[in-house]
């Protein structure tokens, strides 16, 4: 496209230059010729007063000799016969015109121009004192006729070349301005096709290409979002399998000894490894996406009661003490029920998975004006590095964990403007605090005065009810 624009500009500019320069050059040549002969007529007319007064040869010789043209041998006067019939006319100066040219001038009665070797002659008829017509001949050299023409043509040629070069340069720049955005768009499309999802195009260039770049960037963002949703869905679904797997593992542990029991435990362990592999694969190179808005609200107290009924049965099998508080009244939160269920199952599943048999745990729900706090505490060994535990895809201090459980909890909290904190529980182990903002406007980590009272009250209540 770039070279096509250059060729078109070159052809159009060349045609315009030729269309204007050639006629203008001919006009300049004609103007120089007219100027030369106009000057010649003016100089030839200088002898008219002398011829009108006298026809004496000596006086005319002196008059011709006193002029510049006469001194240079370019001026001649052709007098008609002044005596008796049959006498010849008188010629003064250097003659170059032919008899035919002189006869034609006398017949026409006006100035004529005749070509002679080395230039041209101007034949100007002038009346003499006797009433007859004399002819003044003035020689105009070729150099005087073409004086300045070569310079004018050179200037026209330079201007024409400059116009062509300038138009080509402008066309090239315009071509670059059009081609470079198109090339960037093509490169970005190839990169996106090769799997580099971060490929984007600067929205620059002509309006059409700018619109194409905007559409490409929007498409790339949609592709990234769709892939992220697919990975997230695969990871979340895989992680939710942890809850029934935990039940299977606990039930398999109670089967006792024997080949069937060992095979069952081996199958459960193999299934857990496969689920972990699916989770890690789905989380690899996962692009960061903005937290999605909650689909709908739910009653946190009802969800906690339902999930604790399930996990309490398993806790009883492992001789774990369980405490639940704050679920006597409905507590509405802006979180979809499946999201809260997944978050609670992830945290309680971690308690069963990473603490020993007989380890106590508790779940507390605290309702404030601007936030709801859910505390999940255990009496285990705790987490050595809470910051690493909250990092996406890496739970840090717990062996064999994919880190997705805490990530599910964190994303659920951040979707409301809240956050997740890990600390030391009053039971002696880990405490995971889920801060769920109710208005959705408060940034993560922000606390209202009532929210701080709810959190501090949660700590005091936890200390009073320590298991």
Image (tube, grey):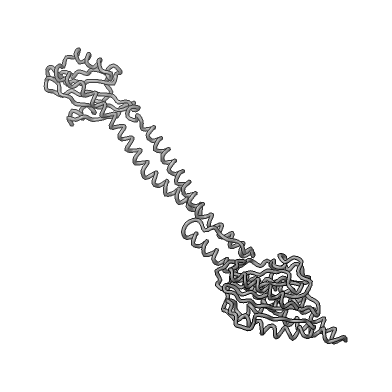
The reply, left or right, for residue 102 in relation to residue 350 is left
Instruction: State whether residue 180 is above or below residue 27.
Output: below
Q: Quadrant of residue 190?
A: bottom right
Q: Look at the image and tell me whether residue 257 can be seen.
A: yes
Image location of residue 363, percent across then percent down = 69, 78
Q: Nearer the viewer, residue 466 or 316?
A: 466
How many marks the image carries: the answer is 0
Residue drawn at the location 78% of the way across and 75% of the way down: 355
Instruction: State whether residue 190 is above or below residue 297.
Output: above
Image location of residue 187, percent across then percent down = 59, 59
Instruction: State whether residue 15 is above or below residue 26.
Output: below
Q: Nearer the viewer, residue 353 or 440?
A: 440
The reply, left or right, for residue 258 in relation to residue 405 is right
Quadrant where the C terminus is found in the figure = bottom right
Image location of residue 403, percent across then percent down = 72, 70
Instruction: State whether residue 359 is above or below residue 181.
Output: below
């Amino acid at each position: 496209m770039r070279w096509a624009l250059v060729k078109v500009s070159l052809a159009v500019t060349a045609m315009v230059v030729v269309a204007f320069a050639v006629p203008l050059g001919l006009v300049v040549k004609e103007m120089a010729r007219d100027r030369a002969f106009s000057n010649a007529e003016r100089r030839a007319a200088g002898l008219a007063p002398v011829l009108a007064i006298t026809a004496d040869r000596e006086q005319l010789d002196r008059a011709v000799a006193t002029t510049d043209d006469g001194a240079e041998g370019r001026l001649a006067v052709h007098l008609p016969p002044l005596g008796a019939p049959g006498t010849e006319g008188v010629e003064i100066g250097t003659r170059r015109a032919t008899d035919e040219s002189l006869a034609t001038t006398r017949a026409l009665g006006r100035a004529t121009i005749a070509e002679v070797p080395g230039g041209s002659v101007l034949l100007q008829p002038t009346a003499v004192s006797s009433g007859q017509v004399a002819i003044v001949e003035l020689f105009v050299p070729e150099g005087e006729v073409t004086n300045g023409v070569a310079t004018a043509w050179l200037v026209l040629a330079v201007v024409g070349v400059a116009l062509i070069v300038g138009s080509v340069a402008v066309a090239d720049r315009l071509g670059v301005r059009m081609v470079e955005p198109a090339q960037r768009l093509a490169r970005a499309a190839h990169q996106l096709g090769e799997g580099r999802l971060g490929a984007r195009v600067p929205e620059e260039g002509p309006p059409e290409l700018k619109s194409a770049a905007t559409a490409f960037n929007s498409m790339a963002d949609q592709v990234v979002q769709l892939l992220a949703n697919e990975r997230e869905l695969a990871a979340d679904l895989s992680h939710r399998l942890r809850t029934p797997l935990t039940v299977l593992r606990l039930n398999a542990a109670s089967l006792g000894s024997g080949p069937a029991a060992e095979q069952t435990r081996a199958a459960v362990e193999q299934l857990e490894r496969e689920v972990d592999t699916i989770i890690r694969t789905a989380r690899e190179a996962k692009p960061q996406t903005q937290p999605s808005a909650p689909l709908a609200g739910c009653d946190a107290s009802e969800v906690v009661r339902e999930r604790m009924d399930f996990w309490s049965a398993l806790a009883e099998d492992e001789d774990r003490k369980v405490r639940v508080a704050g679920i006597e009244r409905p507590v509405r939160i802006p979180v979809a029920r499946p999201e809260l269920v997944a978050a609670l199952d992830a945290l309680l599943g971690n308690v069963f998975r990473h603490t020993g048999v007989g380890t106590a745990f508790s779940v507390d729900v605290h309702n404030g004006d601007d936030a709801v706090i859910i505390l999940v505490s255990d009496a285990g060994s705790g987490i050595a590095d809470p910051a690493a535990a909250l990092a996406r895809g890496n739970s840090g201090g717990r062996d064999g964990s994919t880190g997705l459980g805490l990530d599910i909890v964190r994303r659920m909290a951040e979707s409301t403007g809240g956050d997740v904190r890990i600390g030391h529980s009053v039971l002696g182990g880990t405490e995971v605090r889920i801060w769920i903002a109710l208005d959705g406007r408060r940034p993560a980590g922000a606390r209202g005065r009532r929210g701080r009272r709810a959190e501090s009250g949660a700590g005091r209540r936890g200390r009073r009810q320590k298991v």
